[in-house]
Image (cartoon, rainbow, N blue to C red):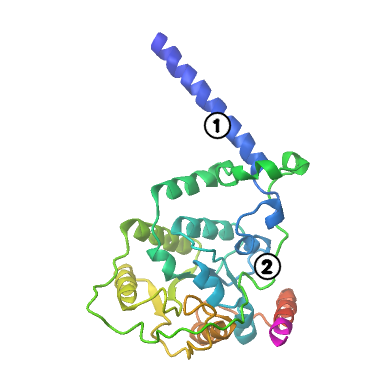
C-alpha cells in the first residue's frame, strides 16, 4: 500500500511539473516571429510570415546557405519562389526543426540541404534540448524571463507578421580575396565519413520531404575554407547509398573568381559570388518537376516589389 502511495505521489508530482512547464511554455514562447518578440534566428523564421503554400523551394543549412543563394535573383530568372532558412552554424536537429516549422504552412516542391551542416558535430544534449523544445518551448526561450511583457501572459502564440526583406538571404558586397584556388584537388585523404547520428537526421529530413511531396537535393556551395575533395567524396558516397540527388558546385563551372567573390577569404561568398551561384541554380532547376513560373500571377505581385527594392540596394 505504501509502495502504491509513493507511485501515486510521484505521478501527481510529475503531472504538476508538466502542467507548470506547459503554462511556462505558453508564457515564454514569442508571440510574433521578430527578434523584438524574442524569436531566435528571426531572419530564417521569416518563413513563418510568408503566405500559405506560396514557397516552391526551401533552402536549409548554415551560413553557407544564406550567403550563397539569393531567392529574389532566382525569382527574377525563373519566377520560382524560394526561401533560405539558413542559420549560423546550423546543426541538423535544428535543420529538422526549421523544416517542420516551414511545413506547417508551406508545401515546397523542392527542399535543398546545404551539405556543410551534415559534417557539423551533434551533441547529445543539443539533440535532447531541441526535441524537448518542440513540445515545451520554455526550454528554448527560458532566457526571455527578463524581457517578458504583459501581452506574453494574455496573447495566444504565434502571430507571424515579420517578413525578411530578402527572403532569408544576406547581402554583402565586401571583397576579401582567397588565394587557395586548388582546394578541390584530389589527395590521398580518404572520403570524410558522415557520422551515423548525422546520417540519421539527414534521412529523417528526407523522409519528411517525401511525406509532404517535396523533392530533396543535397547541395555543396563553393567554399575553399569549408570544402575539399575528401568531404565531396563522403557526401557523394552517402548520397549514392541513399539514392539522393547531389550537386557539388565546387566541381561545377560556376565562374567563381576567388579574388572578387568572397567577403572573408573563401569562407563565404559575397554578393558577386551569390549572383553566380543563383544563376547556375536557375539553369539547373529550370523545368524541374512541380516548379512553376509565377511572375505573371497577380497573387505574387509582392515578389516583384521585393525584387525592385533589392535591385535598388544593389545599384547604390
Q: Position of residue 78 (x, y in %)?
A: 60, 84
Q: Residue furthest top?
A: 1
Picture quarter containing residue 137? top right
Q: In this orientation, does residue 121 appear?
A: yes
Kind of element beneath mark 2: loop
Tags 1 and 2 touching, CB below 8 Å: no
Count the labels in the image.
Answer: 2
Magenta portion: prevailing SS class: helix
Kind of element beneath mark 1: helix
Of marks 1 and 2, which one's residue comes earlier in the chain?
A: 1
Q: Is residue 76 left or right of residue 211?
A: right
Question: Disc number at residue 298?
Answer: none
Q: Residue furthest right?
A: 150
* Residue receiving disc 1: 18
Residues rendered magenta in the picture: 311-316
* Residue receiving disc 2: 164
Amino acid at each position: 500500500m505504501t509502495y502504491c502511495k509513493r507511485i501515486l505521489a510521484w505521478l501527481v508530482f510529475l503531472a504538476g511539473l508538466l502542467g507548470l512547464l506547459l503554462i511556462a511554455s505558453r508564457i515564454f514562447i514569442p508571440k510574433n516571429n521578430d527578434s523584438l518578440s524574442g524569436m531566435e534566428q528571426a531572419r530564417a523564421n521569416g518563413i513563418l510570415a510568408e503566405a500559405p503554400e506560396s514557397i516552391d523551394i526551401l533552402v536549409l543549412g548554415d551560413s553557407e546557405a544564406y550567403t550563397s543563394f539569393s531567392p529574389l535573383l532566382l525569382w527574377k530568372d525563373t519566377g520560382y519562389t524560394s526561401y533560405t532558412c539558413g542559420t549560423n552554424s546550423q546543426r541538423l536537429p535544428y535543420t529538422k526543426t526549421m523544416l517542420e516549422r516551414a511545413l506547417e504552412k508551406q508545401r515546397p516542391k523542392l527542399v535543398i540541404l546545404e551539405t556543410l551542416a551534415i559534417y557539423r558535430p551533434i551533441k547529445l544534449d543539443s539533440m535532447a534540448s531541441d526535441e524537448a523544445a518542440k513540445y515545451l518551448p520554455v526550454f528554448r526561450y527560458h532566457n526571455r524571463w527578463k524581457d517578458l511583457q504583459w501581452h506574453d501572459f494574455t496573447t495566444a502564440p504565434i502571430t507571424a507578421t515579420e517578413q525578411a526583406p530578402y527572403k532569408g538571404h544576406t547581402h554583402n558586397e565586401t571583397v576579401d580575396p582567397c588565394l587557395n584556388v586548388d582546394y578541390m584537388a584530389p589527395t590521398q585523404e580518404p572520403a570524410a565519413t558522415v557520422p551515423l547520428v548525422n546520417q540519421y537526421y539527414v534521412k529523417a529530413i528526407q523522409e519528411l520531404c517525401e511525406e509532404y511531396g517535396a523533392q530533396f537535393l543535397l547541395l555543396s556551395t563553393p567554399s575553399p575554407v569549408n570544402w575539399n575533395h575528401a568531404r565531396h567524396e563522403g557526401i557523394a558516397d552517402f548520397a549514392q547509398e541513399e539514392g539522393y540527388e547531389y550537386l557539388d558546385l565546387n566541381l561545377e563551372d560556376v565562374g567563381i573568381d576567388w579574388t572578387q567573390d568572397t567577403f572573408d577569404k573563401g569562407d563565404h561568398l559575397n554578393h558577386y559570388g551569390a549572383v553566380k551561384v543563383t544563376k547556375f541554380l536557375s539553369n539547373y532547376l529550370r523545368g524541374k518537376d512541380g516548379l512553376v513560373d509565377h511572375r505573371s500571377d497577380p497573387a505574387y505581385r509582392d515578389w516583384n516589389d521585393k525584387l525592385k527594392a533589392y535591385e535598388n540596394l544593389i545599384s547604390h
